[in-house]
Image: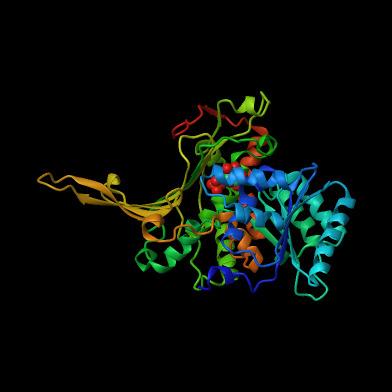
Amino acid sequence: MAPKNTLLKTYLPPIIVILGVSGDLAKRKVLPALYHLLKDGLLPPQTLIIGTSRNDIKSDQIISDLELCIIGENKSCDPTVLKKFKSIFKVIKFDPNDTKSFFNLKQTLNNYETKHKTCFNRFFYLSVPPNVVQPIVKKLGIVNLNSKCSHDKANSFLLMEKPFGSDLDSAKALIKETARFFEEDQIYRIDHYLAKESAQNILTFRKNNPIFEDLWSNKYISKITISALEKLGIEQRVNFYEHTGALRDLIQSHLIQLLSLVTMKVPDNLDDSSLIHKHKLKLLKSVNEVSLFDIKNNLVAGQYKGYLQEVHNPNSKTETYIKIKLTINSKEWHNVPIYLETGKSLNVKQTEIKIYFISPNDTKQQNILSFRIQPNEGIDIVLNVKEPGLNPKIVPVNMDFSYKNNFIEPNHPDAYERVLIDAIRGDSSLFASSEDVLQSWRIIEPILKYWEKNDKNLKIYPKSAKLPIK
Ligand code: BG6
């Protein structure tokens, strides 16, 4: 592997425009990721970061928020790196409803490129509420901020955050509108779960451990569970969450993507991103739409106590917890139930995939393979062994691989750092395609339709609740 500080030297320098720089996502994820990349020498020389905000906010304010955020994560904040960050960071006042703001932004970018006598790759990171995404994309197009540079090497790219639309129809409309101005290869649809190191390891693990290859189907697997449980509530994201809810926020995106990594055919070449996309899409197409039977019998939706007060809406029916059952229409996965579960304000922060192997004789003696996506990233398998001594008792034990115990340098780039690096170097493997997005909406669409006409039957659970929610 090339030394870190030379890794990105060969890529065109980027200008990263963060639209919505004073928002929660920019503060908690995007800016800290850029800070860490800068610290590790992973940003190409001459990188420029521009934040846009409706408010007259100064870059000093953003930098001190950034410092607090890094310290809040118990990470050290290096004053020299912060100073350097400040020197490549600029904030401009920007009204996304006003075309003039887009012209001003264009002028700022042109001036910087003229000063450096070259074109840069321009990245527009849409760190904004879902309802303003489409109008922004349109205005970027209208003022020609979607175009290639004159010497044809540099290009303009969109970095878009999920949810892409709010149902199948709106996703189709968003994709169609975006395609009017940007080619598919100019669009990076971020699903930061795919960029988590432990999620990337799923395909690698499956490909490089032949003992599991023949076991990977309904012949030996009885059930799969995929869960993303969070301790945090909705924090300050009232507006976003009220319009989104747990099904759209995590199931439609992150968890269905994880499901595809576990159940898709493993491509012969994991370096070929088009092959990965092809196999993933094939799998997604074979996932059945949730059936009415499973909506009525195998779906649990809940809301944590205190949510109504947080969102100042006593009538809110937004779910903060959901569990659903999915099935796959293929020879390999017929009859294997797959449960996806996610919730906020629970007693644990944990994302995990569990594969339950069939145990023909005794269900208590099941072998379970777990991919621990976070925390304590790793893989373990439950085996059954004889308890030592005269007692012939069989007990389950864990064979455990953990990143932190096995690698000297467990500090791999975090998911947002990886997303940004990959976009800068033009690797689209870890991003969702427009077709992936449409397939995931198709799968859960019956639930959305059912909820339009029927009560969600929300279970109200206490904060820091222990599973199961009933
Ligand atoms: C985001 C969701 O995509 O993922 C949030 O919008 C959620 O609601 C977050 O909290 C969880 O991400 P992570 O990486 O902390 O598990």
Taking 85 as reference, is 390 above or below it? above
Classify residue 195 by image quadrant.
Answer: bottom right
Identify which residue, 347 or 416, lies in the foreground: 416
> x%, y% of residue 99?
89, 51
Look at 69% across and 54% down and name the residue there.
86
Q: Residue furthest front?
A: 80
Q: Residue furthest left?
A: 390
Where's ligand 1: which quadrant? top right
Taking 263 as reference, is 75 above or below it? above
> x%, y% of residue 119?
78, 70
For the rendered model, the colour scheme is rainbow
Identify which residue, 410 or 366, lies in the foreground: 410
Identify which residue, 46 or 233, lies in the foreground: 46
> x%, y% of residue 160?
69, 54
Mark count: 0
Look at 55% across and 52% down and name the residue there.
256
Q: Is residue 225 left or right of residue 322?
A: left
Q: Is residue 39 left or right of residue 107?
A: left
Look at 65% across and 67% down and name the residue there.
44
> x%, y% of residue 261?
51, 59
Identify which residue, 4 or 371, lies in the foreground: 4
Q: Is residue 155 left or right of residue 106?
A: left
